[in-house]
Structures are given as structure tokens and as C-alpha cells.
Amino acid sequence: EALVGIHQPFPKMTEPSDDPVAEADTPAPRDWAAEGEKLQRVVADQRWFLEPGLSLQILSRRYGMNHVYLSRAINDGLGCNFNSFINRLRVDHAKALIDKGDPRSLTEIAMAAGFGSKASFNRAFKLHAGISPSERRKSKASR
């Protein structure tokens, strides 16, 4: 009995209508790349990435966007996950401090950039910059 109607033809799809009201009912697809770029600008301008306890939920409340959409803007729009997005901003900040000759220790720079530990700083720095923070400092000092 589960196969009752199996021999009936599948209903044909209709052509899209020329009715602008019907078209207006369908939301336009989101431009996740534009959403991601806008988010990145706001997070950088507001310097939220410098806060060690920043989470997706906290950021979504501050930014005023549902955390599912925010995650999608990061994943689909920027091509990375939340942690990678925040760590890249933190590493860029730390690189700028090192490059301008900040006299603080690398641990202090790590904390100033929003990292919770020197180990997570070293790991993220190597991943995003390609070298360790101490190697970067040495290369800048030798110039």
C-alpha cells in the first residue's frame, strides 16, 4: 500500500510568473561576502577582537545579528570560522605592535592583542604570519 499512486505522473513545475507582487514575496539571496566584509570592518574599527573572552554569541549581540547569520557571514563571506577570523585580526594587531618596535615582552603583546595565553598566541601567529612572533621581532630588529 505504500506504493499507491506510483504510476501517476509527477506534477509539472509552472513557469515563474511576471507578477511583481509574487516576486516580492521571495527574499533576495544574501550577499554573504558583503556581509562578511562589513562585519570585519566593524569588528576592526570597534576593536572588539582585542577582548580575550569574545565569543560568537557576544559578537552577535553587539553587532545586532542572529548568531546563525553572523556565523554564515564569517564562514561563507570570509571563508573561515569564527576563531580564525578573530585570531587573524589579533595577529595583525600583534604584527603591527612588533613592527613598530613595541618594547613590551611578547607575552604582554599577546595579552594586549586579545590572546588568553602565550601558547595560543604563538600557535595563531605562526599559522597566520608564517613565522613565530620571536622570529618576526628578530627580523624587524635586524633591519
Image (tube, rainbow, N blue to C red):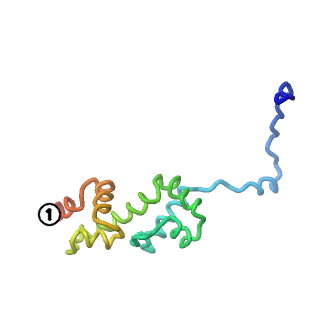
The residue to which callout 1 is attached is 143
Report whether 44 appears left or right of 73. left
* Residue 1 in the image, given as x and y percentages of width and height: 85, 28
> Residue drawn at (30%, 59%), measured in percent from left and top?
125
* Residue 54 in the image, given as x and y percentages of width and height: 45, 69
Q: Residue furthest left?
A: 142
Q: Residue furthest top?
A: 7
* Residue 24 in the image, given as x and y percentages of width and height: 77, 57
Q: Is residue 28 above or below residue 116?
A: above
The crowd level at tag 1 (other Cα within 10 Å; few <14, some 14-19, many 20+) is few
Rendered image quadrant of residue 11: top right
> Residue drawn at (79%, 44%), measured in percent from left and top?
16
Q: Looking at this view, is 61 or 88 the one in front?
A: 61
> Residue drawn at (59%, 56%), measured in percent from left and top?
31
Report whether 64 appears left or right of 42. right
Q: Looking at this view, is 60 or 140 the one in front?
A: 60
* Residue 5 in the image, given as x and y percentages of width and height: 86, 29
* Helix, strand or loop status at disc 1: loop
Q: Looking at this view, is 81 or 57 the one in front?
A: 57
Q: Looking at this view, is 116 or 98 the one in front?
A: 116
Q: Is residue 4 above or below residue 65?
A: above
* Three-letter amino acid code at the position of disc 1: Arg
Q: Report the number of discs.
A: 1
Rendered image quadrant of residue 21: bottom right
- Quadrant showing the C terminus: bottom left
Q: Is residue 10 above or below residue 84?
A: above
